[in-house]
Image (cartoon, helix red, strand yellow):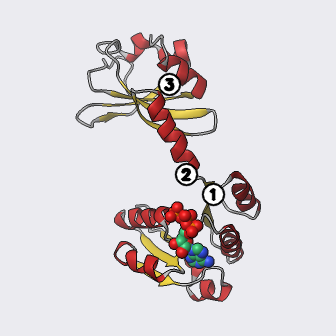
Amino acid sequence: MAQEKEFVVIGLGRFGASLASTLYEMGYGVLGIDCSEDKVNRCKESCTHVVQADATDEATLKSLGISNFDVAIVSIGHEMQASILVTLLLKELGVPKVIAKASSEVHGKVLKRIGADRVVFPERDMGARVANHLAADNIVDYLEITPDVSIVEINASPDMVGKTLRQLDVRAKQGINIVALRRANQEVLVPPGPDEPIKTGDVLVALGSNADVRRWQNGDKA
Ligand code: ATP
């Protein structure tokens, strides 16, 4: 870790609790805040500190030294008013980076407008991700970069095996860049050499427009 970052996660529902415990397992300092005693108790072991408090109370946030944290994640989805107020307070108190979870497009717009540095839509994004998995059997994973551009992980199809990336030439033919190749033994080639032959069990990590990726998946592979 280049610099020891300190995170505060406000709202320890499913999303907040999972985020907090992952950051904690990665070795970061994590303060978890929730107004529910039950949620706080459940997260005791998976955060550096947990506090039961109403995060819409400015005095409470100040007393917790909130402005000393590098990143705050507001993971209150359904209580929109609380989520907006907490995000506003965090920016006013000077937290450098505030990431807020939105439960709808309108909620997301408001969070952006009042100064959230980043807005995430976990339900919407996970829905799109699962749909993409279901739509194409050979898609291993999918990550949206912009609404039109994605990174997809694709199992090497039998017709690719034995060919090199130069021979496949998907960049010229399909407008897709293969940015990494993951071997069955988990070795990752970044970037993969153009003369590296594709093996059975390889996963190709491809970057391209959604339309190009779909066209590539639906037929002509090379
Ligand atoms: P998930 O889907 O991640 O479980 P959710 O969006 O359904 O979350 P919400 O009810 O929106 O859940 O809230 C998430 C958490 O935020 C809950 O544990 C709730 O107790 C907590 N929370 C709500 N309002 C406040 C507040 N003002 N201060 C602190 N915690 C709050």
Tell me if 198 is positioned left or right of 113 in this view. Answer: left
For label 1, the residue is 103
Q: Which mark, residue 177?
A: 3
Crowding around mark 2 (Cα neighbors within 10 Å: few <14, some 14 to 19, many 20+) is some
Q: Residue 222's x, y, as percent?
A: 44, 10
Mark 1 touches mark 2? (CB < 8 Å): yes
Q: Mark 2: which amino acid?
A: Glu
Q: Mark 3: which amino acid?
A: Asn
Q: How many marks?
A: 3
Crowding around mark 3 (Cα neighbors within 10 Å: few <14, some 14 to 19, many 20+) is some
- Cα gap from disc 1 to disc 3, whole angstroms: 33 Å
Q: Which mark, residue 123?
A: 2
Q: What residue lies at 26% left-to-right and 21% top-to-bottom?
A: 200
Secondary structure of the residue carrying tag 2 is: helix
Asked where in the image residue 22 lies, by quadrant, the reply is bottom left
- Cα gap from disc 3 to disc 2, whole angstroms: 28 Å
User: Between tags 3 and 2, which lies in front?
Assistant: 2
Of the four image quadrants, the one with ligand 1 is bottom right
Q: Is residue 170 above or below residue 76?
A: above
Tell me if 114 is positioned left or right of 150 in this view. Answer: right
Does the Cβ of the disc 2 residue fall within 8 Å of ligand 1? Answer: yes
Q: Mark 1: which amino acid?
A: Ser
Does the Cβ of the disc 1 residue fall within 8 Å of ligand 1? Answer: yes
User: Between tags 1 and 3, which lies in front?
Assistant: 1
Residue 72 is at least partly visible in this image: no
